[in-house]
Structure formats: structure tokens, C-alpha cells
Amino acid sequence: MRAMKLQSLARGLSRQLLGPRRPYSTVSAADLKFGQPLHETHPHILKVGQITPGISAQEYADRRAALANSMTVGSVAVLQAAQLQYKSGAVFHSYRQETNFLWLTGWNEGDAVAVIEKTGPSLDDYIFRMFVNPKNPREEQWMGYRNGVEAAEDVFNADEAWPINAVGDELKSILNSARLVYTDIQPASSPRLGHLFSDRKFSTTPLHSVMNNLRIIKSPAEVANMRQAGQISGRVITNAMRRLWTREKDLHAFLDYEFTINGCDGPAYIPVVAGGERGNCIHYTINNDVFRDGEFILVDAGGEYGTYITDISRTWPVSGKFTAAQRDLYEAVLKVQRTCVSLCRESANMSLDDIHRITAQGLVDQLQPLGFNVSMSNIDQLFPHHVGHYIGMDVHDCPGYSRGVKLKAGHCVTIEPGVYVPNDDRWPKHFQGMGVRIEDSVCVDDDSPFVLSTEAVKEVADIEALRD
Ligand code: GLY
Ligand code: MN
Ligand code: MN
């Protein structure tokens, strides 16, 4: 064990003497099979030098260096890959990697552990180890191809890669000499590693808050992926508005299919496709009713591209033409939404919480003249959720990161005011049962917002023109 650790340190040292870490793949993979697309096997998905679409091996290496740079010397970060989830019996869900694991490694398989050990004070003083499922032709014939141990080093640039079965012994030795361990592993929910953390002698600290600080400002490549997701999804939603829909189910299927065939990996989340008062249910996802003439359709949907998502809501009349009441309520929400999108710039010096307060006040100001008996003290009865959240690889990205932080260039957020009027005589009769949400994905820039979902039309005239 100890010999292995010394060998690791020697590798770290030789790397310093020989130059920087390898930024690019060195293996020819053309005639091999891997568990995820690589440039060599899927050049239609990945450009040379990319580990996942749009994200280069160099960017992954920089992310690991940034994590190591936020750790104290002698500390270790331990991340466990997500496990495949089963729907029932042997039927499994599609695999989704744990977000921090994916952000640091690009590795998109379960049964893996990533370990980053901070060995010295300078930026390059760390060791990146991976423990992964080894290749096994017989198991791969049943369960699908795997990346394997060699690819963890040669493609994913681990300094050391081991078969996952070695993780117990190797990690025990690494942890026992660590000054501090950054991890989010819960002993009770980790059969493979739990015992190492349950009767531990080392100190631990949560990793996720360190990761949130690294992930919250998006790189140009990340923004480009979100723009791609937003552009494709926005066009699909606009195309959906051109058609007459009779069933929620059909529109749901259209969105999923069109996101996918137009270049997204697939839908980013189960969409809300709600007719009439079902739009008042914020997370309505059963999508199995019929649309009736005179009602609104509320869609909250977006695709995922290169592991980054977009989050868009649009509301439009089933008939394609707004009634007077629909137009009044819709314009009220749209006016506030436009104002709040315009505040997504560093020069506005606003946090999401600040924008939320402006949204609530804006809705009060818009709704009172329409006959709503509403003020700041009861606006939450009509607008019960926050105006926005951070977006990125997750729809609700960097969970736990404060919405009180002033927005800076590179923060990516949603702006999604909504008004949901219950069938209740406290509210004007002609608005009862209407739900309106208008949501864009936005990247904050210095002096202006960069709207990532601008292809989804939202002006009344533009929506109505789609059916002319
Ligand atoms: N699509 C989920 C949300 O808007 O937060
Ligand atoms: Mn949202
Ligand atoms: Mn949404």
C-alpha cells in the first residue's frame, strides 16, 4: 500500500518535471467499444479533444485543478458515481451520473469512485485517482459496453486508475493518512464505501459547498452548451405553438421527440403540459387530459445538450388567439418577466432574491388595475414560487447555493414569474382557472442579459401570428 502511494507521489513529481498533465486522449479507440461516446468512436458527437460534447479534456483538467486549489494541503476529496436506478425488478431507468462526479471527470458510468488528493501547495500538486468497472466482455454482452480501467487513464486522464474492487483497500490507506476528507458520501447509503466512513479516524467536511462555488459561474463552453439546448428547445416550443393540439399527451410526445431529433440528447425533465386550470398545479406532469377551446396551454419543457439543460415555460391559447381576459393576464405577467430579465446583468447589482421582490411588487402593480384585491401581503396566493433558480447541468443547479448572492457575469438562471388564479370568488370571475407562467433561461452578462431561450416566442402578436 505504502509503496503504491510513494509510486503515486513519484508520478506526480515526474509530471512536474516532464511538463503539464496530458490534456488529450492518446489511445486509438476506433476499433474499441466504450461505455460512452468518445471522439474516436463517435466523431459525429465529439470533436477532437472533447470528453463530453463541447467540454474539452483540458477544461476537465482545469476543473480538477480548481478543486485541488480550494483544498488544504494533505486533504482528499472522495466522490462516488451514481448507481443505476431500477424502476421495477430488472427494469432500469436511463443512467444519470452524479453531477459533481460528471463535472470533474466526464465519466458517465456507475460503479466508480474518484479521488483527488492535494499533495502540495502549488496548482499542479495533486493526484487524480479513479476506481472503475474493468472491461469484461461477458458482462458487457449483457449490460452494455464499459469504458474500462485503461480508458480512465488514457482518455479521462486519471493519474492512476484501478479496478473498482480495489477501492476498499486503496482508499482506506489514502484516507488514514489524510488531514481532512471532503465528501458527500453518506455511510448508510453506500454499501461499497460506507464502512470506511462509519468508524473513521479522519475528519470530514461536505464537498458540495466547495463544488457549488466552483460550478456556479459557467465557462464559455458551458454557456455555449446551454445556448444550444435553449435554441433547439425554443424553436421546438415555437413550432408546437403553430399547431392545434387536442391532447396533452400528444404535445408531450411532440416535445420529447422534437428536442431529441433536433439535436438535444433528450428532454431535460418531465415536462408540464397542462390545459386550463391544470396549469395552476406547478408540477403537473401526468399530461393525460384533453385541451378545451377557450383555455390556455401551459408548457414547461426543455431539452438537454451535452449534459447541460435549458428550462423554458410558455403559455398560449388552445385556439391560437387570446381572449380579452387571457390577453390582460398574459400581458401582466409578460411585462414583469421582461423587466426582470433585463435585470440579469452584473451592472444591476441584483440577486435572485432581489429580483423576486421586484417580481412580486410588479405583479401586484399589474394585477390591481385588473380588479385583483392583491398586495405584497397576499401575492403569494397567486404567485407561490420563487422567480428563479440557478441552471446548469441540473435544472435546479448548485442546490443550496444562496439566492442572495449578487448576480455576476456567468451566473445562469431562470426568470419565471407566474400567476395562477384558482376557481375562487376572491378573484375576478373572468380570470378564474387561468394559469400563466413565462420562463426563460438567461446567462448574466456585464451590461445585458444573454437570453438562452430567445427562440421561444412570447409576445402576444408573435404567438397569434404563428396560426395566420
Ligand atoms: N422546470 C422546473 C422549474 O421551472 O423549476
Ligand atoms: Mn425553472
Ligand atoms: Mn421550468
Image (tube, rainbow, N blue to C red):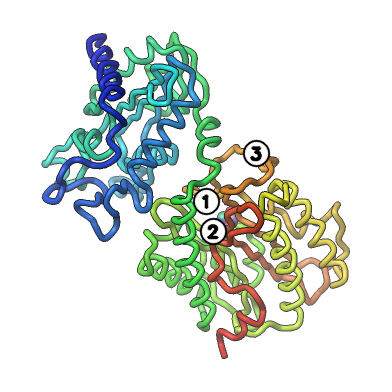
What residue does disc 3 label? Answer: 402
Question: What SS does tag 1 mark?
Answer: loop
What residue does disc 1 label? Answer: 395
Q: Quadrant of ligand 2?
A: bottom right
Residue 362: x %, y % from top left: 80, 61
Tell whether label 2 touches label 3 (CB within 8 Å): no
- Asked if disc 2 is less than 8 Å from ligand 2, the answer is yes
Mark 3 residue crowding within 10 angstroms, few (<14) / some (14–19) / many (20+)? some
**What whole-number distance in Å separates the C-alpha atoms at marks 1 and 2?**
7 Å
Residue drawn at point x = 82 percent, y = 67 percent? 366
Residue 311 - label: 2
Pick whichever of labels 1 and 3 is earlier in the sequence. Answer: 1
Tell whether label 2 touches label 1 (CB within 8 Å): yes
Residue 379: x %, y % from top left: 80, 57
What amino acid is at disc 3? Ser
Q: Is residue 196 left or right of 223 when viewed as pictured?
A: left
- Asked if disc 1 is less than 8 Å from ligand 1, the answer is yes
Q: Is residue 184 left or right of 339 when viewed as pictured?
A: left
Question: What SS does tag 3 mark?
Answer: loop
Question: What SS does tag 2 mark?
Answer: loop
